[in-house]
Image (spheres, rainbow, N blue to C red):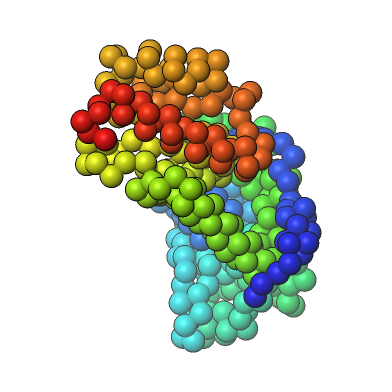
Amino acid sequence: MSYTIDELKESVNSIPKFIFEKEKNIFDIGTRGFYENPFTDVVAYILDSNSEYKGRDLFLKYLLQDFPEEVVDSFIDKCSTTTQYTTGMGNRIDLLLYNNSYLILFENKIYHTLNNPLNDYRDDITSKYPRLQKFFVIMSYKKEHVPQDWKYINIQKTFYSILKDPSASLNDKWDYFVKDFLLQFSDKHKLKMEQDITEFIENNFSKILDARDKLDSYILGLAEQIKGETDIRGYHINNKNWAKNEIAIRFYPFSDHNLTENNVTLVFTNNGKLNISLYYYVDFTENSLEIHQNLGENKFELWEEDNICCLKTIEGLRYSTIEDATSEVIVQIQNMRAYYSKKMQEKV
């Protein structure tokens, strides 16, 4: 589906903003920290009798504070866990906590809607474990209207209470690991913002795809325009592994195999400015001073990368309009050709 520019602008203007940066913890780094499966796996480890986490008893007491005392004591003494348990109908139960007397079924909802086949969960467990006393629990960040005979545990409030307990200690790596886990899910502001982002994507997914398609077409058209005006060998659009939230177009002026790597790069930076980077594949020590002086020491910042000469527009001189930036790309393509024409006449 295609949308008008005004429709896309309206969606862009409604993107939720993170209003502050909080200290990162281990669950922020390289993980899907707010997803339900990692959450369930960590909870299962903490609760299991074989856990190396010494604060397990305290965790259990808070998590099961609305359960009969004899049930809590029984699980503190001994219990096992199973995650992603498959019912006879093929549905998956998040977590089972059990011992020889009791079984608790946990369905974890971080912030997604509760629409799981709870009846199948209950019927399957009831038929397979008839002699165990069973409890059924919904764990969620937001308030849920749970079915009759199901219990509700508020993740944020429970985890916050564990963190604030004066008996909680930090003595080994597991204490620090669990503290980070509790911090991740007791921060109501962080979870609220994550939920807002998820809801925005779900509500605007087709618009996001259309905007991305329009952006790709625009970048491609711009690259083709510069190629047509400069008769360069080619270009490469890098929109995946450049700097975060930035897009770069490398323009290659030369066809000669000795010069093919030299390029002029237009960078769409994440602050809305446009930067020009230049890559001269010549010895840095021998040539950098001359290149820098020719192009303008007050205009470009010079750096060395693998002994080649690299330059980029000084921060305060970066471009605000596409027209100005593309004009500069064309000028720098001409300058690069002039430099090699002078220095390596026989190669150009």
The answer to whether any part of residue 261 appears in the image is yes
The quadrant the N terminus occupies is: bottom right
User: Quadrant location of residue 105?
Assistant: bottom right
Residue in the foreground of this view, choosing between 348 and 251: 348
- Asked if residue 272 is positioned above or below residue 279 in the image, the reply reads below
Q: Name the spot of residue 66 as percent of width and height, x first.
A: 71, 59
Q: Name the spot of residue 38 as percent of width and height, x first.
A: 50, 56
Residue located 45% across and 50% down the image: 227
- Asked if residue 235 is positioned above or below residue 118 in the image, the reply reads above
Residue located 62% across and 37% down the image: 324
Residue located 47% across and 69% down the image: 84
Q: Name the spot of residue 43 as percent of width and height, x first.
A: 53, 54
The quadrant the C terminus occupies is: top left
Taking the image as shown, residue 149 lies to the left or right of residue 318, namely: right
Residue located 33% across and 35% down the image: 262
Taking the image as shown, residue 206 lies to the left or right of residue 312, namely: right
Residue in the foreground of this view, choosing between 140 and 241: 241
The answer to whether any part of residue 165 appears in the image is no
Residue in the foreground of this view, choosing between 242 and 308: 308
